[in-house]
Image (tube, rainbow, N blue to C red):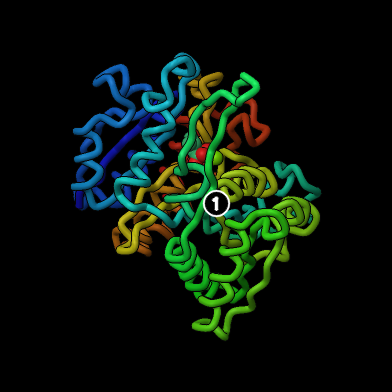
Amino acid sequence: MLIALLPGDGIGPEVTAEARRVLDAVCGSALSYEEAPVGAAGYRAEGHPLPPATLDLAKRADAVLFGAVGDPSCDHLERALRPEQAILGLRKELVLFANLRPAKLFPELADASALRPEVARAIDLVIVRETNGDVYFGEKGMRTTPAGRRQGYDIMSYDEDEVARIARVGFETAKARRGKLCSVDKANVLETSQLWRDVVIEVARDYPEIDLSHMYVDNAAMQLVRNPGQFDVIVTGNLFGDILSDQASMCAGSIGMLPSATLDVNKKGLYEPIHGSAPDIAGQGKANPLATILSAAMMLRYSLGKPEEADRIEAAVAAALSAGHRTADLGGTTTTTSEMGDAVLAAL
Ligand code: IPM
Ligand code: MG
């Protein structure tokens, strides 16, 4: 099976290198890899954040393992050439619309959570975030108002098929877990959200066994820190899911811990840590590779049909934490990126 390895920018290469070592240890020659530049690295190498050869590799591969993109030195470029366009382009071109972001507290990390340990301990949820539509992909631009003032605009929209498609992933995910689905929207203000809510209720007829609730996004942000244990699966749009998943990550200990999978209808997927490229600590061996290692485990489980290997990796991560290894984001002072990788390998 072929893995497209797209390390990207900043800490991306460091964390994907550790994930690769773990995959080699668990799967050996069952997986082969081809690496390609993406993000600012793609722009430097080929003049585009998502070079055609990189996109082609992602399409050919059985799964994509992605690091992170983003580089402040590219902030002056026109939007189409900025590193972030690489991940947006991959999601769109490969029709990766279902972004699964599990947030679960490793018991060893209760003290690393931004929440009190007794509140944090209850977190075990999955955010199902739509990633092909919403304000991310609507018409956008800069224009001048009649009064001669500059105006930026980004159009938010969802059609009913897009909502139904992600709603089904939400219901199916809930079915495989504790049977609770909370749909997050802003239906008190946005027409996009009104349609979202109506369609989720329609799809719910096919899932009578699922306990469905609806919540406005502002309330959801509040409830996530007040009582995160109330959530099982959250289904939401692209923008709200982006924000809530960063928030959930800190509730669960550290943004350096959260993996993600973004799937198409056939469960082909792109796997990436939810964190960004962290240019401020790039190349210093400070980054936590666990989110990427856990993303590799998700890849084995969802796209490559290797659930036992995925379990082994997740158990090894837990063991490395139990043994006391902590990168800086987890409050550690000495453990480097590669030492954390070593600790996972030792536990395997
Ligand atoms: C994420 C990131 C991306 C997003 C950026 C890098 C475009 O924040 O995957 O959460 O907004 O989707
Ligand atoms: Mg984000």
Q: Position of residue 128 (x, y in %)?
A: 52, 58
Q: Which residue is mark 1?
A: 318
Which residue is rendered at x = 41% and y = 55% of the image?
97
Depth order, front residue of 316/228: 228
Q: Position of residue 100 (x, y in %)?
A: 49, 56
Total marks in image: 1
Task: Say whether mark 1 is within 8 Å of ligand 1.
Answer: no
Quarter where residue 112 is shown = top right
Which residue is rendered at x = 49% and y = 63% of the image?
163
Residue that extends furthest to the front in the rendered view of this protein = 146
Which residue is rendered at x = 49% and y = 21% of the image?
282
Q: Is residue 313 left or right of residue 53?
A: right
Q: Position of residue 4 (x, y in %)?
A: 26, 41
- Does the image show residue 72? yes
Depth order, front residue of 196/288: 196
Q: Is residue 53 left or right of residue 285?
A: left
Image height of 175 relative to 229, above or below: below
Image height of 296 relative to 12, above or below: below
Quarter where residue 263 is shown = bottom left
Which residue is rendered at x = 47% and y = 43% of the image?
138
Q: Amino acid at mark 1?
A: Ala
Q: Secondary structure at mark 1?
A: helix
Q: Position of residue 116 (x, y in %)?
A: 81, 49
Q: Residues within 10 Å of mark 1 (few under 14, many from 20)?
A: some
Depth order, front residue of 331/84: 84
- Does the image show residue 273? no
